[in-house]
Amino acid sequence: MGGLPMLPAEKIVHITMNPKFDEFGAFLFGKQMLKEQIIIPEWDVPENIKSLVTTRQGGYSKIPYDSFNLAEHVGDNLLHVQQNRQKLVEYLPSEPIWLNQVHSNVVVNACTSAIGKDADGSYTTQRNVVSVIMTADCLPVLITNRQGNGVAAIHAGWRGLLNGILEQGVCQLLKASQCQPEDLLVWLGPAIGPEMFEVGDEVRLAFLDKSSNKEAISKCFLPSSYQQEKLVVQKRLIQKLLIQKKWLADIYQLARIRLSYIGIENFSGGVFCTYKQKEQFYSYRRDGKTGRMASLIWFE
């Protein structure tokens, strides 16, 4: 990595770096931030665009929030959360604009919104203003443009995704930065993977109902193998189970399809599974009581 000293292999959780981030990565390494296991997104963006994602490693929180929990609403010791946030801010140009995420489709201007506002995304066209969202299975989406004059961070759970949170974020960013959809660049951060994200039939039907390309959407849902096993073993329950059918959803592909509908073609990321990668990520589906990671983006 550009001549940087290597960490012991057993301490490296997941680090990806675009060559354009060498200077930024060197800065973080000098501050020992990489030792605390952050992810630097690997995507082809202008050099002034900066982004990072925290993992669960390197903080103060105790079990079951161990250890770099950044959420105040999950039952963690608030002193530990503040210590974690203070530690994070040391490596940022300004205090992140934390939101009160409510699974909505509301995206706000980070420059004019108070910290703690009810919303699930923010955007900015001002330098060194940090947009941030928190997740622990839901999909974090970071967006910028080829001009390097605007960024957005979106929290896309299935409800927000279904109700247009990505479209809202894109619309706001396009208007504010005066660019076109083909100028936008998208990075899909750590979310629950398609092998573990089980949903009910009502979720699948809701996405199909709101889509003009039902064939593409239907491919994002595969029958749950767990349910198939129950159908074979407990034949008497077939009728009931068919009513309560379960599916494995690919939230990454659902996001790509929604974004492609509005003219976006440039995607990166989408390779993680918060449920499976227990040492790196928090997962609400896996653990219930747990912390949250942060996905942050800004430009210089």
Image (cartoon, rainbow, N blue to C red):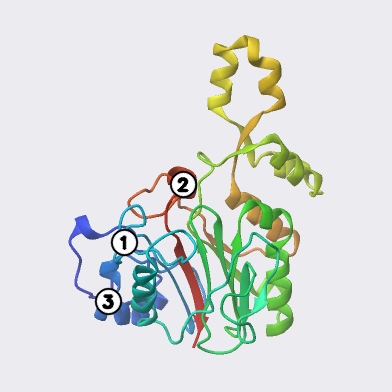
User: Residue at point 31% right, 78% down?
Assistant: 28
Q: Give amino acid for label 2.
A: Gly
Number of the front mark, 2 or 3: 2
Residue 268: percent from left, percent from top: 53, 62
Look at the picture and state if 147 lies above or below 159.
Answer: below
Q: Secondary structure at mark 2?
A: loop
Say left or right for 56 vs 228. Answer: left
Distance from the alpha carbon under mark 1 to that under mark 3 = 15 Å
First of labels 1, 3 by sequence position? 3
**In the rendered view of the protein, which quadrant contains the N terminus?**
bottom left
Q: Secondary structure at mark 1?
A: loop
Q: Give amino acid for label 1.
A: Gln
Q: Residues within 10 Å of mark 1 (few under 14, many from 20)?
A: many
Residue 38: percent from left, percent from top: 36, 67
Say left or right for 2 vs 208. Answer: left
| Residue position for label 1 | 57
User: Residue at point 64% right, 86% down?
Assistant: 112
First of labels 2, 3 by sequence position? 3
User: Residue at point 30% right, 79% down?
Assistant: 26
Q: Which mark is residue 29?
A: 3
Distance from the alpha carbon under mark 2 to that under mark 3 = 33 Å
Q: Give amino acid for label 3.
A: Phe
Which image quadrant for residue 178? bottom right
Residue 272: percent from left, percent from top: 45, 52
Look at the picture and state if 125 lies above or below 188.
Answer: below
Q: Which mark is residue 160?
A: none
User: Residue at point 68% right, 64% down?
Assistant: 166
| Residue position for label 2 | 288
Q: Secondary structure at mark 3?
A: helix
First of labels 1, 2 by sequence position? 1
Q: Looking at the image, which residue sits at the far top?
A: 236
